[in-house]
Every structure is written in C-alpha cells, then in structure tokens.
Image (spheres, coloured by chain):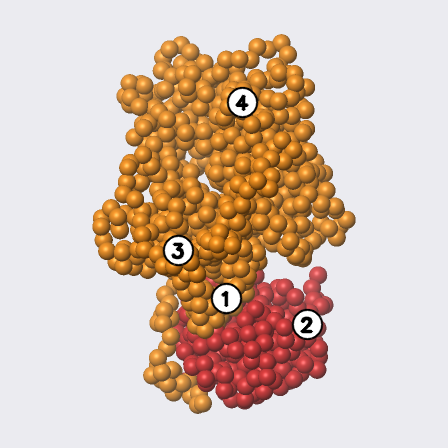
Amino acid sequence: MQELLTFTIIGLSTGAIYAVVASGLVVTYTTSGIFNLAHGATGMLAAFTYWQLRFDWDLPAPIALFLTLFVLAPLFGILTERVVMRGLQGTTEVVRLSVTVALFAFMIGLANWIWPSDSSREAFLKFFEGNSVAIGGINVSWHRIITFGCAILVAIVLRIVLYKTRMGVAMRAVVDDRSLTELNGARPDRVSMFAWAISASLAALAGILLAGEQQLNIEPLVLLVINAYAAAIIGRLKNLPLTFFGAALLGLLDAYYLAYSDSSWFPQSFFGFSLSGVRASIPTIILFVALLARPQSRLRAGVTRFREESRVPQWSTAILGAVTLITITIGISGMLTRANTLLLLNGFTFAIVALSLVPLTGYAGQMSLAPLTFAGLGAIAMAKLPGNGNLLTFVAAILIVAVVGAIVALPALRLTGIYLALSTAAFAVLVSKLVFNQRQTFQTGNIAVPVLDVPFVDIGSPRSRLILASVAFSILGLLVVSVRRSRLGRRFIALKDSPAAAATLGMNLTRTKVIAFAMSAGIGACAGALAGDKVSPQHYDFTQSLPVVLLAVVGGVGTVGGAFFGGILLGGNSILASVVPSLKNLAKVLPGTIGITLGRNPNGAALQTAESFRSLQSRWGLISFAGLGAIVIWALTAADVLSHWSFFVTGVVWFLAVTPNLAAIVDSTHRTRRNSTILYLAAGLVLCGGVDWSTALDVTGQRLVAVVILVAVIGLGAQRMIENEPRVHKDSPDVLGLDRSFTGEEIEQAERELRVSI
Amino acid sequence: MNQPILELRHIRAGYGAIEVMHDISFAIEPGQVVALLGPNGAGKSTTIKVVSGLLRPSSGQLVVAGRDVTGASADALSRAGVCTIPEGRGIFPNLTVRENLVMATFSGRSLEQIEHDAYRRFPRLAERRTQLAGTMSGGEQQMLSLARALAVDPAVLLIDELSMGLAPKIVSELYEQVARIASEGVSILVVEQFARTVLGVADWAIVMSHGVVQVSGPADEIGEEALTSAYLGDRSDP
C-alpha cells in the first residue's frame, strides 16, 4: 500500500510536468493551427539556459527563473512567430509540420553547439534540493510539491487568460476566422505572438522542472514532448481539462510500470520477444490508441488552394535527368577518395529514402515521419532472408516491407493531417523501441547487410556501390515518374487536392491511401536493402527520420529532383561536418536553418532551380551548347589542364550559373549589355578553371563554400546584367493616421465637417 | 462642401494575375445607403474586400472621410470606423455570444455599452448570452453580426450578402433592422445578389457586372431593364 502511494505521487508529479508541456502545445495549436513538434526542444533549450544562469553563473534562483520564464522564453516565442511561423499561412500541413521539424533540428544543433555534452558541468539541482515533507508517512520532495503547484497554477492562469481576458478571446477568435478578427479591429499577428510567447514560457517551465528530476540531457528533454503529444491528443488538441487528465494518466502508468514490472507475475517476454522496451514506449502506445479513438474527421468539401504547385513530370526530362545522373556519378566516382565515396553513397541512400516520400507525401499529401523505419525494416529483411543478397532476396525484402507498410496504413487510414503524421511517428518510435532492440534483429548492436548480387557485375568496392546506388535511384525515380503520369498518380493527386470530390467520383480513398503507403514503404526498403554494409539500429531511429523528411520537403517533396536534392544535401552536410571540423557546429544547425526558410518558398529548392532552367525548354541548340561546354570542361580535365577540384568548381559554375542565363543572352536586344554579360561570364569561368583550387584552399569545406559563393556571384551577377527590364519597386501608399484609432476630438471634427450629427 | 464618407477612385484589384475590378469609382455620401448589385462573379465581394482592407488594390485610391487610406490594414480601418459584416456569417462560431461582443471592444467602446446596445435592440441575444454563437439559428447569427456592427457605432457599415442561406421572412426582418440603422445616419454599403430585397432600403444603387460599373443611379430609378441586362447579359452583346 505504502509502495502504491509512493508511486502514485511520483506518477502524478511526472504527469504534472506533462500537463504543463501539453497545455503549451494546445495553446499554439488552437491559436495558429500549427502543431509545434519543436515544443519539447524549446523546453530543453530553456532548461539549459536556466542551468547556465543559475548554476554556471551563480545567479540567485528567483532572478534566473524570472529571466528564463518571463524574459528569454517569451522573447524566443515571439521571435519564432515573427520569423518562422508567420510565413506559413496558406501552406499545406506538410510544410507547416516540416518547418517545426526544422526548428526542432535547429534547436538541438544549437544546444549541442553551445553546451557540448562532453564537458563536465555543474549538476542541475532540484528546487530546495534535499528538502522534503512527510505526507501520510511518505517523504515528498519540495521539488515535487512545487511541480504540483506549478501545474495547478498553469491550469488556473490559462483558464483566466483564455476565457476572461479580451486577448484570450481574441486568441480563440483567430482560430475561428482570421480575417473576421481583423475586421473586428484586433491585430491577429499580435495575438499569435502573444500565444507563442505563452507557449514558450510553458515549455520553459516544464523543461526546468523536468531537468531537476532527470538532469540535463538533450534527448530525454526533447522526447518529453512525445508524452505531451499523447496528453494533448487525449484532450483532442483543444480541451485543457482533458489534456490535464491525459497527462496524469500517462504519469501514473509510467510510475506503476516502473513499480511493478520487476514483480514475478509480470511477463518479461512475449513469445520470445523481450519486453524491455515497453516502458519507454508506454506514451507512444497511448498516443497511438488516443489517435485511433479519435472520431473520424469528416471529409470537407471544397478545394483547398495551396501555394505549392505541382507539375506533371515529362518523360524527356526524366530520362535526360536519369542518364545525366548516372553519367556524372560514373565520371566523378573515379576522382573521389574512399571516405568521400562512402559519404556520397550515404547521400544517395538518403536520396532514395527521400524519394520514398514523393508518392506518399508529395503526390498523395499524406505526411509520414517514419521513412527511415521502413529502410531499417528493409535492411533487416535483406540480412535475415536466405539467399545472401541475390536479386530474389532483394525483391522479397521489398515486398515484405511494402506489405508491412500497407498494414501500418490500415489503422492510420481514418486519420488525416497532423494526426496521421503523429501516428507514423508513434509507429517509428514503437519499431525502434520494440523491434530494433531485440536480440533477434540486431544481435551485437549491428548487422551486416549483404551487397546486392547483380548478375555479371562484380559489386564490392565503394565505387561500384556508389554507381549501383545512382542506377537504383534513377530506376526508382523513373518508376515514381511513371506512377505520377498514370491513372494511379492522378488518384494520388486527387486524394491530396480534394478527398471529398474524389470520393464523390467513386474513388476508393482507402485503397489509394494503402497503395501510397505500400509504395512508399517499398521504396524506403530499397534504401535499407542496398546498404551493403554493417548497419546499426541508430541509423533508422525516429530522430534520424526527421531530418530526412525535412530536407525532402526543403528540396521539394513533389518532385523526384527535389528528393534527390534533399538527400544529397543531407549527405553533403555530413561531408561538411566530417572534413571541416571547424564547420562542425555550423553543420549541426544547417538543416534546421534551411528548413526554417520553407515558409518563404514552400515549393522546395529543386523546383526553384528547375524554374531557372525553364527558359531553355525545347531550345535544343542552347541545350547542346550547354552539353558541349560540359564535355569541353571534362576533356580539359582528362588532358590534365584542369585539376580535379577546378573541374568540380568550373562544372558547377557552368551548370548553375552560366546555363540558366543562356537564353536571356541570346534573346537580348541590347547589344552592349549582351556583350558585357558574355565577358563577365567568361571571366568568371576562366577564374574558376584557372585557379588550382586544390592548392589555393587547403580544406575541402572552404572549397565547397567557395563554390557556393562563386555560383551566387557569377550567376546572379549575370542575371542582373542581362535583365532587360529594370525592376520597378512600388512604394506602399501612405496610410495617413491609420496606425492608431481616431481620437474623440478628430471624430468630432470629422463629424462637423461631414455634417453628421448623432 | 459635402464630402463623401467613402470614395473609391479608379480602383483596380484582383487575385494574382487575374484582375477582378477594372477601374471602379463611386462614392457614398454621409447617411446614404448604397446597394451594390450584380450577378455572381461581378466583383461585388472583391469590392467589399478592398474597402474593408482585406485586399490591397493594385492601383487607385480608397478614401474614407477625406483621408487617403489606400493600403491600410483591415484592423486599422476597423478601428477607424469602417465596420464590415463579411459574406456568410460575420460571427465567431466557437465563441459565446458575449465573447463575440467582447471582440467588438477592439473598436474602443466598452463592453457594457456594447452589450447594452446589442441586447436592447435584439433581446433574443440577451437570452443566449452564454451560448456558443455557432449553435444559434442562421437568423440569430446574423442578428449577432448586426448587433456588433451597431454597437461599435461605425462611420461606414459594409454588409456583404446578408441574405445568404436564410429564409425570405428572416431576410426581410434583417433588412428592417438595416433600414433602422440607416435612419440613425450611418452610411451603409450593402452588397446583394437578390436585388429586390435591398432596393426598398437603399437610396442609391450601383449595378456591377464583369468588374465594371454598368449603371448607377437613385435606387427607385434603377429599372428592371438595367438589372436584367446586367444579370442576363446585354441584348446588344454579340
């Protein structure tokens, strides 16, 4: 009995922390419609900040608390809203969620950067560490009592703010109808800012309370948010009392499991499967159950207009792209060091995983946060199935995982948008906690995935594996393109654009969704099955999936090229980190930083790049000229005129800076402008080819940075020179006196002049 | 000189590359009720969006009480006395009736005043004070949006398709209220697709189609012919 009571108190105090986190989530979701995956990361960052102020700089606790909770955290929330979230109106759920993923990645990177984990640091003490009071014969620490107090206080304050103040009413009004709120004279932007400030404060409070219990560790603090998701979903993302109830339930379950799982009557294994991962997955299981218990969302009629565009890919472009990719890969694979080959191979693997999101997320509009989980399952299947990597094993592995994907899709079918995304996240966490940690799957922490046995070709060296990966990506890419151009692809698009319209036309939504999931799982499995090396479960963890999803969306998840771009970017980022230790910290925050800009350009980078090549469409003379230039550069390298690095720099500049401007140069009617542009580009190319970059800059990272700068300066410079019409910037018309409301005097005067009498 | 309370000067506006209003100009004198009529797609609702500040015109000027307010935001215009009842129901369905009135306090008037005025005119709203606005009948919801408009004591009132989805009897009741508001000297721009419901209330009528003003004149002089040609196309059209 005593034990039960003790664990009840432990459970309730953990639940109190969950409640504080979850209520912050609910506040931002109800006011901005954005489900903030980075909410836990905000709490983590705040806990570190508090530690810095309180324990490293020895400020008194009240001052440190005040600074963290009421100054820094709200400022951070306002900054987030202002810089990141405001640009997200009118974007799809996919983009909105990805931006919070980006924020998540950014904050983890930042924390790793500022507070590296290897430094031995001062302990994070509880409030009134060591003090406790006896309640009913049980010692309860003051920290726990404070935690309870905070949760109750948060509940009361939120209730008052949301229901009794005008700002709170406005916060809820914004969700109902943003433009009507504006028509009422409230400023929706300011209202959202306020909501984000409150939310960040709540995250900070929870982070500090939790760090007192569990010490400062990035991961548990960040994943704390998963427990909060479950609580928030129990509260249907809007009901605060239910959310608090869910949080208490989670805390109690966790504590009771901790208390009784060692008892003799408690099962330790289930049909030979170890149940050691169960405790960690309790919140996930509850999240899953709560999601499935949600009432089915009704199909909403009407077309939703998004800022994203989708174009049907052309066969000619697709085949040209595939051939170019394979040719370039073969061409440069001979020049790479072994380490760089492996890193590029990694990039290709990510690209295939990102590609698995194209039919599912890009076409069918279904968000998945678990792409790497399927890759992991593919790797296991490839390693465990008999045949030691022959083609039949490969196909069988893909099929098995595709079936798993379809089965996973079944319970998730009734969910849409954010709920679907969360259920895939729950699936990913469950698989890594319950499947990947089994002795049967990864015995010694890793397994060897056999190399694919392609008939007549010997594949073993990293170089041949790299070429194989490029071929695999090309084939899968063409497959995805063919799907997009088929009846099935049109069904996917219909599912995304208007499920209601698709259903009234007699389309089976369920079947279409299941096919999309199975296809995505199958492509993901390819990435795992092609690993051809030792892999460990960490590679396929949920937290690893997030950057892949993020960069796929950044690249442009609606196109094959976007998936490639995203994958290579992620691979390139690890190249950056490994070869330039000084840039390691930059590499940590880079994916997040790129993703945060998504709101400005929701179509992804690949489409934007493709847009610049649009001017070349069906102008075969110019295209051959571009190809000829590439051959010349390659020939110069083969004849040892150019060094390998100069080849790389010149090639990239030729493609990304010179080629997009060709059409404009040819079309220009302004003679001197045309000549000066040609001269400028030629000078740029000579600079790129003439300098021996391998000696001029001695670090790979510096060379990569140089490439980016050269492309930007040469490409954009030429574009500005050749542009025929100077851009006109219209000044905004003046808004006389409307930044404030009229004063009584002014109204009186106006009424006198207007001869209106009231 | 009698200055118009609201004036559009050569306004062009649209969505993206598509222009919906082609060079629209008209003015509303103080105390006047102007009906803006026209078939679907004539540009009526876009006109309301421009005047209320939700849509920025691509060229032209919007003048309120002699001040150029082109490009001012909707919330600024609202606080300056331009009150809008948008298409559909101009209420927040998930807020209670009282909370909907709280939202009206952004205009600068106190909640007591607003509640007093609203409940005096629509006693039924007082009964439903704590009810969620979205659970009321369509007519009651429009009463609430009218109550808000009245309570903030606007200089100009913009009404977009008050009749949408309501029974004719309720529509005529609502327009009686509009007439009463007008009799208190508030200038009103009212957009309607169904001309007859509104012509009884209006002093002046403007008939739009295809984004241009076709006819404009005193409400009782707008003949059947002008309306028919605007709605069904001109007979002289090829």
Q: Residue A737 versus residue B103: which sits nearer the camera?
A: B103
> Mark 4 and mark 3, same subunit?
yes
Q: Residue A507 versus residue A278: which sits nearer the camera?
A: A278
Sequence-earlier tag: 3 or 1: 3
Location of residue A343 (image quadrant): top left
Q: Residue drawn 31% across and 47% down? A: A124
SS at circle 3: strand
In this view of the protein, can residue A69 be seen by the observer?
yes
Give the foreground label among 4 and 2. 4
Q: In this view, does A316 lie above or below A283?
A: above
Instruction: Tell which subunit mark 2 falls on.
Output: B
> Mark 2 and mark 3, same subunit?
no
> Mark 1 and mark 4, same subunit?
yes
Residue indicated by mark 4: A447
SS at circle 2: loop
- Asked whether disc 1 touches disc 4, contact meaning CB atoms under 8 Å apart, the reply is no
**Where does residue A571 sit, x and y in percent of width and height?**
45, 29
Instruction: Tell which subunit mark 4 falls on.
Output: A
Q: Residue drawn 53% across and 41% down? A: A262
Residue indicated by mark 1: A172
Crowd around label 1: few <14 · some 14–19 · many ≥20 (10 Å): many
Instruction: Tell which subunit mark 1 falls on.
Output: A
SS at circle 4: strand
- Asked whether disc 2 touches disc 3, contact meaning CB atoms under 8 Å apart, the reply is no
Q: Chain A is drawn in which colour?
A: orange
Sequence-earlier tag: 4 or 3: 3
Going by the numbered disc 1, the residue's amino acid type is: Arg
What whole-number distance in Å separates the C-alpha atoms at marks 3 and 1? 42 Å
Give the foreground label among 2 and 3. 3
Q: Residue B8 versus residue B192: which sits nearer the camera?
A: B192
